[in-house]
Amino acid sequence: MSEPCIDLSGVAKTFGDTRAVRDLNLQIPSGSLCGFLGPNGAGKSTTIRMIMSIIRPDQGSLRVLGGDALDHKDRIGYLPEERGVYRKMKVGDYLRYIGRLKGVDAASLRTLITDSLERIGLPDVEKKRCEELSKGMQQKVQFLAAIIHKPELIILDEPFSGLDPVNAMLLHDLIRELHDEGRTILFSTHVLHQAERMCDRIVMIDQGTKVLDDTLETIQKRFDPRTIIAEPLGDPTAMGTLLEGAPEVDSIKIDDRGRVHARLRDDADADRLMATALAGGSLRSIERARTTLDEVFLHLVNRPLDGAQTGFAETTLV
Amino acid sequence: MMGMLLVLPLLFASQFKPLEGDVAVVDSTGRFATAFDALVAERRDRDRSGDAEEVIRKLGIDDRGGMLSGSIAAAAEDATFGVVTASEFTPDADEVIDRLKEEARDGRWIAVAVIPEQLVAAAQSEDDNAPMIDLFLPKETSPRHGEEISDLIRSTTVRVRFASAGEDFARVQTMLDRPSVDVRRLGSEAGAESSDSKLRMLVPFGFMMLLWIATFTAGNFLLTSTIEEKSNKVIEVVLSAVGPLQLLWGKILGLALVSLVILITYGGLAIAGIAALALTELLSISVLLWAVVFFLIAYFTVAALMAAIGSAVNELSEAQTFMAPVMVILITPMLLWMPIGENPNGTLAVVTSMLPPILPFAMVMRIGAATDPVPIWQLLLSTAIGIVSVVGLVWAASRIFRVGILMQGKPPSPLELLRWIRQS
């Protein structure tokens, strides 16, 4: 693989008494669509601002596109978390201004602005003042401003916040499109299932420390819960007792919806247990439990969700 | 602008309705009404043109063709007196006064004046308890008209006294007239005399005001645009395209041009006005060049302050806390105008023109006053101090700007600002 698009090593940043980011190492390969996850206040925005050279790290080294972000500002698109527009400026003028700042020539901007506004479903707003737009429309204009110069690296801080499902879907499609064009995209969110649907790579941080950094595929393998969930039509306790007796089962738990969660022993055969369950009576459903990023995250930061499944049988992949 | 300054007071005067009507005068000499009418006629003539001409002469303006005095006189046309006359009554009985008062209530007279005989007698007594004139006004008479009538009656009384003593009042007045003086300034070379002018006081003021308006208009733009970008959260978008110092310098230099346009527009108008009035000897090229130098120092001083304040706060209302240094620059030049205008090379003037941040404002007043050229070493020293202080201020402002522009929440205290400046 070529040199990573973003390369952080040993980066730390302290604000007063708060250690926002501590000893962060992060490599984002070129062409990846990377979700940058973490709860509120985890240090996501601080990290992104450091990547953008808007604030400087106290320690560590930081390379973006092989140098400082400020030297490559025309190759980077950035949608900050704290975003706004010049309220009195016309939408077209605003995009033109940002585009010119990013080094796009005026002639190509003219058609570019009209076309892109059409693409995001706002064909008639070019002559309107920014303050006339709704908050969601402003968000889309801001997104456009971030990518108007067709950057090779796109950094989006909470791009989905404040968007309705329709517009979130539109934005999702736009980001996938940009990804398909081969651009590197890093976006932060605290809505984990959003990232799960889109990303090929996940970075999670909590309290300024990286807790996870892998491809989605590996994560799913690594955090396989190794649990069978069986929902019997009859008495759940009977099914529970049956499964508990099976040699493959490590432990049993029955949730309040009457489903039996049977945790498998290491290197036990899941199919055999499923067959045992099917033979033991009529079932409404039976499945292998799937991991969700929410669970992975909660597991990693040691804050189990109420009513969550049992812990993961984490298999360490080296 | 100068013309406006002269015409405005007269326009204000024209707000009032002219005094008009008949005054009933009760006196025994029988000379009062004639003297009164003559006085009114004289005053009216003087107001039409005399005042304006005299003002213009005093200011030392060469009013060729009477362009200026004519227009002022036109504005003053209706300003003071309409047709005011006096009718005389002999004080033979008390009923006369009562009857006249009754008629004044009905609107026949605008005033009833009773002149005691002693006041118009040829021989004046030295008595302190001299009787007074009784003046009756209808209750709806405006205070201003009351003053005017009272003034006319008193002046007329003096004239009647002279007439009673057999003197010609016009002759006495000529004798009492204080002659006017034609002041000429001796230039550095023989023959280069210039007429003195009250405008000399206005030139330094004009210089200072120009500087003041140009720098603060642009400075205010700088403050509000920085705050707007911060409070609208657009700043991070902009900062992803340019560095904070690039943004700061873009703002400062861009608005310097705006400020220069303001300066050239108003300054050009003022210079055109001065040229039209043939007062060009008040200005010289070197004075104008120095004015530009001090304009730049003033602009960068104000701009640095405004940028620092704008970046440190979140809203315009929070900026008030930090406005104290700006207020000093705003107000001190106003206080300095009179003392520096009168004594442009005095100690106060020399000291203030070396003192940042008010130095450029004090110095333009000194060079504008021009009665005595400012020593060249003082100009150079002041420029040097100015440049050093501007470099320091802009450096400190850029430190504050870089930290403050991304700071949200509680605005920093002045001490915190100092810490921002110190830390790299």
Image: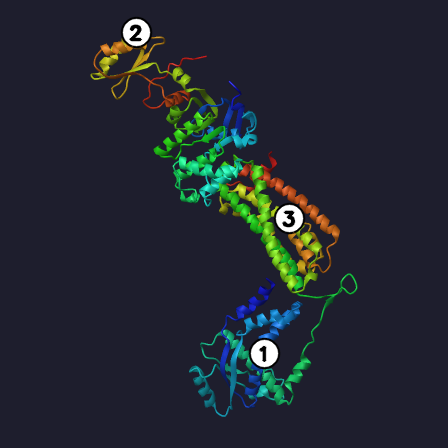
Q: Which residue is mark 3?
A: B296
What's under tag 2, amino acid-wise?
Pro
- How far across and down, in percent of the image, does residue B15 sit? 50, 70
The answer as to whether the residues below labels 2 and 1 share one chain is no
Q: CA distance from mark 2 to mark 3?
A: 89 Å
Of residues A19 and A202, which is closer to you in this image?
Answer: A202
Q: Which residue is mark 1?
A: B45
The quadrant where residue B199 appears: bottom right
Are callouts 1 and 3 both on one chain?
yes
In the rendered image, the vertical position of residue A203 relative to residue B236, given as above or below: above
Q: Secondary structure at mark 2?
A: loop
Q: Closer to the N terminus: mark 1 or mark 3?
A: 1
**Residue B409 visible somewhere in the drawing:** no
Pointer 3: residues within 10 angstroms few (<14), some, or many (20+)?
many
The percent coordinates of residue A164 (x first, y second) are: 35, 34
* Label of residue B367 in the image: none
Residue ID at (46%, 39%): A84
The one of A39 and B272 positioned closer to us in this rendering: B272
Foreground residue among B151 and B124: B151
Task: Identify whether B251 is placed above or below A166.
Answer: below
Does residue A256 sit above or below B97 in this rendering?
Answer: above
Find the residue positioned furthest to the top. A247
Residue beneath the point at 58% across and 70% down: B72
Helix, strand or loop for disc 1: helix
Q: Residues within 10 Å of mark 2 (few under 14, many from 20)?
A: few
Q: Residue A217 or B205: which is nearer the viewer? A: A217
> Which quadrant of the rendered structure holds the N terminus of chain B?
bottom right
Q: Which residue is mark 2?
A: A247
